[in-house]
Amino acid sequence: MKNRIILSALLAATIALSLLFNGCADATKSNDTAQTTNAVALNTTGTAEEAAVPAETPVPQDRAAAYFASGCFWCVEAVYESVKGVDEAVSGYAGGHTKNPTYEDSNTGRTGHAESVKVIYDPSVVSFSQLVDVYFGSQNPTQVNGQGPDQGSQYRSIIFYQNDAEKEIIEQKKAALAKELGEPVAAEVKPFEKFWIAEAYHQNYEVQHPENPYIQNVSIPRLNRFKAKFPELLKANSH
């Protein structure tokens, strides 16, 4: 029994280290090996309900939507949902050239899409400008094609604009940040075209699977770094 406990502990530690180095995509592939990860792997092994793509989330008349990509969408979704004035952050895919992308397709890097989030927010509480501050302040802005252990074009940073006013805000903040850092900021600035909502099991992933080693070692620390940097933007229950 003692040897079995030791072996289980070593196995869990090995998986956690693997997730740190291999990233978000591999976090779903280790579920059959360790009981501490989430119950759902890729959508080929989940239930039909988990694999299904949810209906598009409508934006009420008094709300607005913004679209961002900066690494694993589990992490980005959790960051934005901690911000006051944000009703919901939805995980999905944007910036690519294929229709109806799946998680597996996106992770090949061949669809052109990046893991993205749709942020539905109340502009009377939080502005688009502040959401851009959240965007740049919750990532490594100089990392090209990835964030942390998540590397590849599907994890690249993109900030999407829907009109000239948003484009100007983004470009001014990006230029100011590059000047402050003394090096280029990696985020692409692209016109918004289409957001494809991700499979059901990706939605609210950090909340649903807090025990997942990737969530424990990558996503939660990233969220906590953001919270420490922007306490004035947090919802009351996010401190």
Image (cartoon, helix red, strand yellow):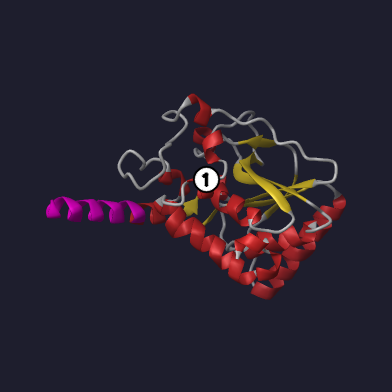
The answer to whether residue 13 is left or right of residue 41 is left
In the rendered image, which residue does mark 1 sit on? 205
Q: Residue at x 64, y 57 (%)?
A: 82
Instruction: Return the x and y of residue 113 as percentages of the image width and height.
Output: 61, 40
Query: Seen from this angle, which residue lies furthest front?
Result: 237
Along the viewing direction, whichever of 201 and 188 lies nearer the viewer: 201
Q: Residue at x 35, y 48 (%)?
A: 36
Along the viewing direction, whichever of 11 and 174 lies nearer the viewer: 11
- Quadrant for residue 194, please give it: top right
Along the viewing direction, whichever of 145 and 60 lies nearer the viewer: 60
Which is the main secondary structure of the residues drawn in magenta? helix
- Quadrant for residue 175, please give it: bottom right
Instruction: Return the x and y of residue 151 as percentages of the image width and height.
Output: 49, 51
Instruction: Return the x and y of residue 42 as percentages of the image width and height.
Output: 44, 34
Q: SS at mark 1?
A: helix
Q: Residue at x 66, y 47 (%)?
A: 89
Q: Residue at x 34, y 56 (%)?
A: 17
Highlighted magenta segment, given as a residue range? 1-16
**Can the viewer see residue 148?**
no
The answer to whether residue 95 is left or right of residue 65 is left
Q: How many marks?
A: 1
